[in-house]
Amino acid sequence: MSETDFATSSDTDDPRKARSRAHLLRAATTLLRNGGIEAVTIEAVTRISKVARTTLYRHFDSAAHLRATALQELLPPVVRARDSGTLRTRLIDLITRQAAVINDAPIHLTTLAWLATADHADYGAAPAFTSLRERIIEQYRRPFDQVFDTQEARALVKDEDRMLALAQLVGPIVFQRLVGLEAATEADCVRLVDDFLAARAPRE
């Protein structure tokens, strides 16, 4: 995910606006890394970035919007699915590359970003966080939807089961990372896919 995901076209077309926005986001992500979500305030960001408050509000309509955009920068990038191959081959390739991204991500920052997009009495219900949460779900689902949109996959995974399938395939990799176990290997990813497919295979 890039800095421009929450930007309007006018933000990115004007070099001066793009520079001021970049300064603001750099300050916000620095505060986020060092002090957590509550450290990202309008006052702190304008002080560190040396960008005026009025300019900040041209880019971000609230502190929640600024925090959501900064949090987006901490999330692991989304990988692309292969365009061809069997369901097993495509899933193994996708899961293996997603595991590499998860394993390389700074775990405390990624965890912070994920948790902050959940419902929270102070900021989770803000429209900016709701938008970010929906965007994350959409983007991380997209490569799996591409794999599951085949006749072979539809026989095993119903449309309404796709989020469960994603959790079954990626969940163990994330869990290993969170609890400090060894990073998932390619062999682990192959086993995950084979177990997933075996569990969903038609019974004779």
Image: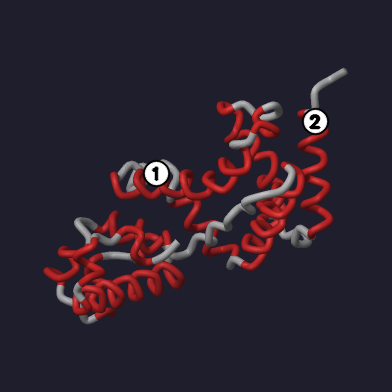
Other residues around mark 2 within 10 Å, as few (<14) / some (14–19) / many (≥20): few
Please give the count of numbered marks on the rendered protein.
Answer: 2
- Tag shown at residue 199: 2
Residue 159 shown left or right of residue 57 in the figure: right
Residue 194 shown left or right of residue 11 in the figure: right
Q: Residue at x 47, y 57 (%)?
A: 113
Q: Earlier in the sequence, mark 1 or mark 2?
A: 1
Quadrant, the C terminus: top right
Of residue 108 and residue 140, the one placed in the foreground of this image is 140
- x and y percent of residue 149 in the render? 59, 36
- x and y percent of residue 82 in the render? 64, 53
Other residues around mark 1 within 10 Å, as few (<14) / some (14–19) / many (≥20): few
Of residue 97 and residue 117, the one placed in the foreground of this image is 97
Q: Is residue 131 above or below residue 148?
A: below
Q: Residue at x 41, y 48 (%)?
A: 135
- x and y percent of residue 63 in the render? 26, 58
Q: At label 1, which amino acid type do we have?
A: His
Q: At label 2, which amino acid type do we have?
A: Ala
Question: Helix or strand or loop: what does disc 1 sit on?
Answer: loop
Per the model, the C-alpha gap separating discs 1 and 2 is 36 Å
Quadrant, the N terminus: bottom left
Of residue 61 and residue 188, the one placed in the foreground of this image is 188
Q: Residue placed farthest to the left in the image?
A: 54
- Tag shown at residue 120: 1
- In this rendering, which labeled residue sits more in front, label 1 or label 2? 2
Q: Is residue 16 above or below residue 184?
A: below
Q: Residue at x 58, y 58 (%)?
A: 79
Question: Helix or strand or loop: what does disc 2 sit on?
Answer: helix
Q: Is residue 42 above or below residue 148?
A: below
- x and y percent of residue 38 in the render? 36, 60
